[in-house]
């Protein structure tokens, strides 16, 4: 779960995997259809969603959960979340709450 590290870079991940950064980038692009940053942010959004599913928003703020999911700023979190889910984090939480 290296994606939870807010400072994870393509080079760092490649080093960890013992891979070439350019080849890793090409692999992500070809197999997942997104660039490295979008791929990592998708993983982080999923981590955030799991925290919401576990009810962690009852104990922590949404921003705290975003940081715990690997995001390093509120703006990046909101931008990535909206890009991947089509709604804001707050709208996501409200929608989940209204279904309960």
Image (cartoon, grey):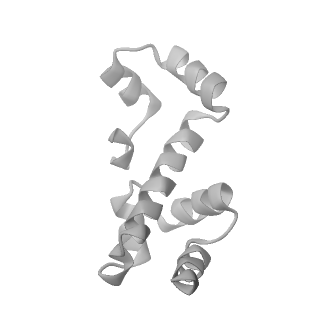
Instruction: Look at 33% across and 61% down and name the residue there.
Output: 68
- Find residue 94 and report its image quarter: bottom right
Residue 8 position within the rendered picture, expressed as x and y whole percent measured from the top left: 39, 40
Instruction: Look at 43% across and 75% down and name the residue there.
Output: 62
Q: Going by the picture, which residue comes out furthest to the bottom?
A: 98
Q: Is residue 95 left or right of residue 59?
A: right
Q: Looking at the image, is 39 positioned above or below residue 50?
A: above
Residue 13 position within the rendered picture, expressed as x and y whole percent measured from the top left: 38, 28
- Residue 72 seen anywhere in this rendered image of the structure: no
Q: Looking at the image, is 25 positioned above or below residue 84?
A: above
Numbered-mark total = 0
- Find residue 48 and report its image quarter: bottom left
Q: Which corner quadrant holds the N terminus?
A: top left
Q: Looking at the image, is 48 positioned above or below residue 9?
A: below
Instruction: Look at 36% across and 75% down and name the residue there.
Output: 55
Q: Is residue 87 left or right of residue 73?
A: right
- Residue 84 seen anywhere in this rendered image of the structure: yes
Q: Is residue 12 left or right of residue 26?
A: left
Instruction: Look at 61% across and 78% down and name the residue there.
Output: 91
Q: Going by the picture, which residue comes out furthest to the front?
A: 100
Residue 57 position within the rendered picture, expressed as x and y whole percent measured from the top left: 38, 78
- Find residue 92 and report its image quarter: bottom right
Residue 99 position within the rendered picture, expressed as x and y whole percent measured from the top left: 57, 81
Q: Looking at the image, is 56 positioned above or below residue 66?
A: below
């Amino acid at each position: 779960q290296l994606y939870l590290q807010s400072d994870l870079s393509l080079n760092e991940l490649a080093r960890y995997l013992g891979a070439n950064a350019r080849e890793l980038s090409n692999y992500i692009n070809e197999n997942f259809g997104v660039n490295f940053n979008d791929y990592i942010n998708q993983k982080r959004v999923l981590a955030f969603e799991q925290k919401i599913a576990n009810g962690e928003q009852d104990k922590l703020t949404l921003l705290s959960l975003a940081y715990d999911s690997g995001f390093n700023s509120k703006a990046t979190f909101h931008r990535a979340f909206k890009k991947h889910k089509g709604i804001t984090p707050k709208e996501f939480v409200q929608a989940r709450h209204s279904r309960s």
